[in-house]
Image (spheres, grey):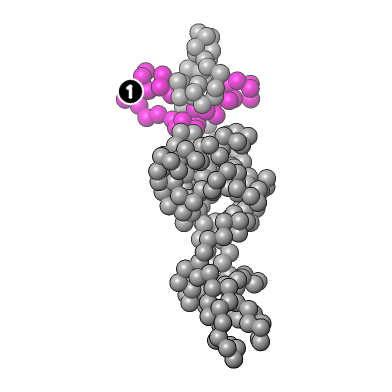
Amino acid sequence: MASVVCNNCDEPHSAPVVTEDGSYGHYCPDIGFVPLDRTYLQAVLPDFPQVIDRLADAFDCRQRKISALHGQTWRIGSVETASEPVMLYFHPTLQSEDEARDLQNALGREVRSEWRLVVTSRGTLPMAELVAVRLDDLVEMDVETGLLRGVSDPGTLAGVPRRNPGGRPSAYGPVISRLIEERINNGQAVKGRNKEAEAVLNLYLQRNPDKSAPSLSSVKEYVTKLRTGQ
């Protein structure tokens, strides 16, 4: 509800629903703030700036933006993960081609981040080089305070590869490294890391059709290591 009827005065009147110290309620000129049980409210008018602010707080985001990028696309901010930062965005729904185009148009105004995650309330239409996730798969709300808390790791949802802190090296390491070096020596390597990783993985699958294969994210890590000499 955007407003409720206040019955605490001599004359009942309409009062807008507000939040104070994380609690829903309304103001009465006679007794001040009157808290309301969350279940009393049948609906809440979305306040997108507040939604974005709560999401940013839930993940301690940096590079926040308090206004929409374009249309109804919002930048939540950059969240640190165990390996790489992920830039979070919010778009109310992502169910149609028009909504996908609106999102792409808005993101085209942003500096390109390697890892991006778009949060929606409904729909996760597949998009190239972009991962979308439903709001309720990322956070949950405390019905008493209205605060949000994360229930999933943004890095995992975005597909960010985990750093290996040590231990047993991957069995794929030697063979993938040889394929990368082979493509470099033959002048077949392409500049983009993602496209080169895809080409290396396809080459591995062609030569080893009956064997298990490493993940694309793992191949990307090997490409990066070979190119930087790490």
Q: Position of residue 119 (x, y in %)?
A: 51, 49
With 132 as the anchor, is 29 left or right in this view? right
| Residue occupying the point 40% across, 46% down | 95
Tell which of 149 and 10 is nearer to you.
10
Q: Is residue 143 visible?
A: no
* Residue found at the far top of this picture: 186
**Magenta stretch, main secondary structure class:** helix
Tell which of 89 and 200 is nearer to you.
89
Q: Is residue 202 magenta?
A: yes
**Badge 1 density bin: few <14, some 14–19, many ≥20, Cα 10 Å:** few
| Residue occupying the point 52% across, 57% down | 139
Which residues, given as a range, are shown in magenta?
201-230
Three-letter amino acid code at disc 1?
Answer: Pro
Q: Is residue 208 magenta?
A: yes
* Residue found at the far left of this picture: 210
Q: Position of residue 87 (x, y in %)?
A: 59, 42
Q: Which residue is mark 1?
A: 209
With 110 as the anchor, is 207 left or right in this view? left
Mark 1 lies on a secondary structure that is: loop
Q: Position of residue 156 (x, y in %)?
A: 51, 44
Q: Position of residue 104 (x, y in %)?
A: 51, 37
Q: As displayed, is residue 116 above or below residue 190?
A: below
Q: Is residue 153 visible?
A: yes
* Residue found at the far bottom of this picture: 10
Q: As displayed, is residue 99 above or below residue 147?
A: above
